[in-house]
Image: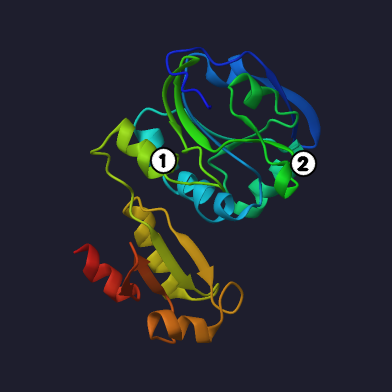
Amino acid sequence: MLKNIEGQKIPSLSFSIIDNGAWTKRTTENIFDNKTVIVFALPGAFTPTCSSTHLPRYNELAETFFANGVDEIVCLSVNDTFVMNAWAENQHAEKISFIPDGNGDFSQAMGMLVDKGDIGFGKRSWRYAMLVKNGVIEKMFIEPEVEGDPFEVSDADTMLNYINPNAIQKQTVTVFSKPDCPFCQKAKQLLNEKGLSFEALEVGKDISLSTLKAVANAETVPQVFIDGKLIGGNEALEVYFK
């Protein structure tokens, strides 16, 4: 049975990491001492739930976590540093620290190393999340021990609700644009002035014109979405902020 070890100190270990093409090490003391850190551990890089939901949502809410006293967000998996670095690049998760527990030493010391040999994974980490303050585990969210790969309690929203149920989440903004479009530049400038970060998708490169028509019912750019709602072009965005 997996044990909840809230109130205990993090095991003292080091992780071998490739950083800027060179081998280096990060110790648990370096990661956790005198800091508030979120750790979410998962079975494997590039696996479906981890790539589609678990990691992206932590990255999406990172600024909200930082605004609520978190110093670092760590994604940990029993994979080597090359795999973790490739996954980080693939996911564009620049706000997350990827820690490779290649031998499973940390997961074993945490009591979270499990055998997934039946699906060819070997020893892997169970899925869980924890909030660590100055090296001491304050809160753990451990997925239920049932068959398969449950994902019910270690998600980013559950963690945020624990840290601050009244936390104000930043708005999610997507801008469909083209490189030489002056109206697109005006829309992006306005979003920056309002302090809103946004994902910019280039029509013709990241998405096709037919996709733009399908999602925005429009053929012109920019097309701005805020929290999933279509705002429209530059003029509509100006009206929205008024």
Which residue is disc 1 drawn over?
A: 153
Q: CA distance from mark 2 to mark 1?
A: 28 Å
> Percent position (x, y) of residue 61?
41, 45
Mark 2 or 1, closer to the camera: 1
Q: Earlier in the sequence, mark 2 or mark 1?
A: 2
Q: Residue at x 73, y 22 (%)?
A: 25
> Percent position (x, y) of residue 32?
53, 19
Vertical placement of residue 33 versus 214, above or below: above
Q: Is residue 76 left or right of residue 130?
A: right
Vertical placement of residue 208 versus 25, above or below: below
Q: Secondary structure at mark 2?
A: helix
Q: Is residue 241 left or right of residue 145?
A: left
In this figure, what is the number of numbered marks?
Answer: 2
Whether the residues at callouts 2 and 1 have beta carbons within 8 Å, the answer is no
Vertical placement of residue 200 versus 236, above or below: above
State which quarter of the image contains the C terminus: bottom left
Q: Secondary structure at mark 1?
A: loop
> Percent position (x, y) of residue 149?
55, 47
Identity of the amino acid at label 2?
Answer: Phe
Q: Residue at x 63, y 27 (%)?
A: 107
Identity of the amino acid at label 1?
Answer: Val
Q: Residues within 10 Å of mark 1 (few under 14, many from 20)?
A: some
Q: Residue furthest left?
A: 242
Which residue is disc 2 drawn over?
A: 82
Vertical placement of residue 132 versus 128, above or below: above
Q: Residue at x 31, y 46 (%)?
A: 169
Q: Residue furthest right?
A: 22
Closest to the observer: 56 or 117?
A: 117
Closest to the observer: 85 or 117?
A: 117
> Percent position (x, y) of residue 87?
67, 48
Q: Is residue 215 left or right of residue 232?
A: right
